[in-house]
Each structure stands twice: as structure tokens, then as C-alpha cells.
């Protein structure tokens, strides 16, 4: 009788897959997988091309293994010499001719390209705690919908929803909400590509309800490895 019992046990284990077509993944593991596609190395540098409301600029992005990051302007001429420094949950603007870094307030971080840059560099698992997962359709595609809540009051957005394609478990979109429940920003992810032998998300679009694709970001010329630590010093 041992064999029939084993077969019966296996049938019960397979029941969710037979009924729903695909076993539900662990929400935290799914978020971690998405973060690895967006941050393929603990530390790296890359060129970032930003198109915002018809204007194009190019920046050099440097990300340290502790999560600090910096954007240095490459083009156009007005961007050269400018930099944005992000350490933890604080942000500064560095401008040519100024010896001191200009703090960016929490309110300013919620507006325009500052908000977009903040969202684009965010490791979701660092700022958000998965609170649920369920199947659903997004843009006509079968997805996992992961709901997340902010881990700390200082995180700019109180809640987020991550939409991950069931096929391949790659990210499709992420929606970020204010504490009031109003939609703040939406990210649409490009399909993964390959860089330096790793699968990466190299492009995304940023928008809101009124402007679904207000800005686009593309990453290229990836360079794995720790950037120069001096890049993250704050001028005083």
C-alpha cells in the first residue's frame, strides 16, 4: 500500500498546479529576483540616457555596494559639471562653481525627474515589505501582482504594487502610491537584455496617471565593480 499512498500524496501536492496552471511563487523571492535584474552587480557604473518631456540628457551612474549612488552630467552642455549624490535616504545636488552640496528636500524628491531618478535606483526589497501576492492580468498579459508596504516612514511612497510576468518571472510594471492611496508614479520596464554576461533591465519608462510615459531611461556601457569611494564624499 505504500506506493498508492505516495502517489496520492504527490497528487495533492500537484493539485494547485493542475487547477491554476502554475504554482504561486514566494513574494519576497520574486521581488529579490526583480532587484537582481535591475541591479545585476553589488556595485557598478553605467551610462544613463534620460529623455524627459522631449529633452535628452546623458549621465554617468555610479552605484556603490552599500547602496550609495551618484549621477554625473555628460551632455548637453548645461548638464556637464552637475551631479546628483544619493546616500541612504538623503540626496544632494552638486553644481559647477559651488563648493557646497545643496540638499534636496523630501518634498522636492517627489517632483519630476528627481522622483524618477529616485524610483529608478531603488532596490525594492530594501524599502518595501511584500504583504501579498496573487495572479492577475496587466496589459493583457498573465502576471503575478505583488503588493508591498514601506518598511519605514521615511520611504517616499507608502505602498507599491509590482507586476511580474508569469512567463519568465520578469518585471512588467510597478505602481507607487502616496499614503492617501493616490497613484504617484508608474514604472514600465523594458524586456531583459544581456550585459557583461548577465541578464539586466536596461530601460524603463516613468509616468503618472496624466502622463503614462513622461520620461524614459536607458542604461548602457555597464562596468561591474566598486566605483571610486571619493565620488560619494559630500563637499563641505
Image (tube, helix red, strand yellow):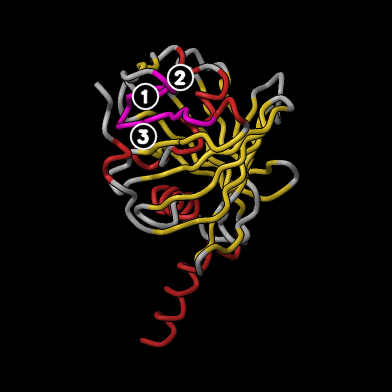
Tell me the residue at 39%/17% (across/down). 104
| Residue at x 30%, y 36% (from the top left corner) | 232
Position of the C terminus, as image quadrant, is top left
Would you say residue 20 is visible in this rendering? no
Q: Earlier in the sequence, mark 2 or mark 3?
A: 2
Within 10 angstroms of label 2, few (less than 14), some, or many (20 or more) residues?
A: some
**Magenta residues (range):** 80-97
Looking at the image, residue 111 sits to the left or right of residue 153; the answer is right
Describe the element under mark 3 as helix, strand or loop. Answer: helix
Mark before the other along the chain sequence, 2 or 1: 1
For the residues bearing labels 2 and 1, Cβ distance under 8 angstroms: yes
Q: Quadrant of residue 36?
A: bottom left
Mark 1 or 3 closer to N-term?
A: 1
Q: Which mark is residue 127?
A: 3
Which numbered tag is attached to residue 115?
none
Q: Quadrant of the N terminus?
A: bottom left
Residue topped by disc 1: 91
Apparent side of residue 52 relative to residue 201 in the rendered image (left or right): right
What secondary structure is found at the residue carrying circle 2? Answer: helix
Give percent across and percent down for residue 50: 62, 35
Could you say which is closer to the camera, residue 168 or residue 102? 102
Percent across and percent down for residue 173 are 61, 40
Q: Secondary structure at mark 1?
A: strand
Image position of 101 (left or right of 141): left
Percent position (x, y) of residue 55?
70, 28
> For the residues carrying marks 2 and 3, which lies nearer the camera in this image?
2
Tag 2 residue: 109
Amino acid at each position: 500500500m505504500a506506493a498508492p499512498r505516495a502517489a496520492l500524496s504527490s497528487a495533492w501536492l500537484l493539485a494547485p498546479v493542475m487547477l491554476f496552471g502554475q504554482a504561486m511563487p514566494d513574494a519576497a523571492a520574486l521581488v529579490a529576483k526583480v532587484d537582481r535584474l535591475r541591479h545585476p552587480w553589488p556595485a557598478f557604473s553605467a551610462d544613463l540616457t534620460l529623455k524627459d518631456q522631449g529633452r535628452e540628457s546623458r549621465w554617468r551612474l555610479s552605484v556603490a555596494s552599500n547602496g550609495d549612488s551618484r549621477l554625473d552630467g555628460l551632455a548637453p552642455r548645461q548638464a556637464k559639471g552637475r551631479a546628483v549624490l544619493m546616500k541612504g535616504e538623503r540626496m544632494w545636488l552638486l553644481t559647477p562653481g559651488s563648493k557646497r552640496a545643496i540638499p534636496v528636500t523630501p518634498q522636492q524628491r517627489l517632483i519630476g525627474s528627481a522622483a524618477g531618478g529616485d524610483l529608478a535606483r531603488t532596490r525594492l526589497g530594501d524599502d518595501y515589505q511584500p504583504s501579498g501576492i496573487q495572479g492577475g492580468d496587466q496589459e493583457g498579459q498573465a502576471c503575478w501582482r505583488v503588493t508591498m508596504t514601506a518598511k519605514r516612514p521615511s520611504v517616499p511612497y507608502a505602498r507599491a504594487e509590482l507586476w511580474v510576468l508569469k512567463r519568465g518571472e520578469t518585471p512588467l510594471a510597478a505602481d507607487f502610491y502616496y499614503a492617501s492611496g493616490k497613484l504617484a508614479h508608474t514604472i514600465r520596464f523594458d524586456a531583459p537584455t544581456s550585459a557583461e554576461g548577465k541578464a539586466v533591465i536596461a530601460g524603463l519608462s516613468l509616468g503618472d496617471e496624466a502622463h503614462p510615459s513622461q520620461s524614459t531611461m536607458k542604461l548602457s556601457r555597464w562596468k561591474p565593480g566598486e566605483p571610486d569611494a571619493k565620488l560619494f564624499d559630500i563637499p563641505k
